[in-house]
Amino acid sequence: MAAAPAAAAIPASAAAPAAMSCSIQTRSGHYVTAVDGGGRAADVVRTDATTVGASERFQLIALSPTTFAVRTASRNYISVVKGGGLRAGAIRTDATAVGATEKMGVVPIAGGWSAIRTPSGNYLTAVGGGGRRTDVVRSDATEIGPDERFKFAC
């Protein structure tokens, strides 16, 4: 059996991945906030903001046509803990580099909405559709329902 070809290294002169500054809105019309701009392992996000400020702006960094990383105002990345499948402690905002748990997928839905697929294939949920300060995000949804819908304004 032939060995798999080695992955090509990205040359240092290669262009950086495309990034867009975006807000993320839940189905209730509230915005996702990175608490303290990111860099946290607990109490990391809220979904009760009604306006967009610095902590509600994220850099969506395209890693491929269907995969992206999310960077917070503090220049940390959102991580999906264990790749997904959790009801509590589902995400963190303290990653300093993009690894496997920082790579998320986007699934377009009608009406300008999208679902966010975790590395394990689950979907992120804005609990109650948003508007919360505790029990905010879960990563255990196996189907796209109303609370798995997000709108990106870039």
Image (cartoon, helix red, strand yellow):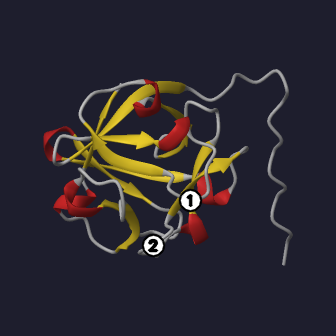
Residue 4 left/right relative to 130: right
Residue 124 x, y percent position in the rendering: 38, 61
Q: Amino acid at mark 2?
A: Ala
Q: Residue at x 64, y 33 (%)?
A: 75
Q: Residue at x 82, y 21 (%)?
A: 13
Residue 1 left/right relative to 37: right
Q: Amino acid at mark 1?
A: Ala
Q: Nearer the viewer, mark 1 or mark 2?
A: 1
Instruction: In the rendered view, tell whether residue 36 sits above or below residue 139.
Output: above
Q: Quadrant of the N terminus?
A: bottom right
Residue 82 x, y percent position in the rendering: 60, 71
Residue 47 x, y percent position in the rendering: 32, 48
Q: Residue at x 83, y 41 (%)?
A: 9
Residue for badge 2? 88
Callout 1 crowding tier (Cα within 10 Å): few <14, some 14–19, many ≥20:
few
Residue 137 x, y percent position in the rendering: 38, 61
- CB atoms at circles 1 and 2 under 8 Å apart? no
Distance, label 1 to label 2, CA atoms, is: 10 Å
Where on the picture, by quarter, is residue 33? top left
Question: Of 153 and 128, which appears nearest the observer?
Answer: 128
Callout 2 secondary element: loop
Q: Residue at x 24, y 52 (%)?
A: 130
How many marks overall?
Answer: 2
Where on the picture, by quarter, is residue 83? bottom right
Residue for badge 1? 42
Question: Of 135 and 107, which appears nearest the observer?
Answer: 135
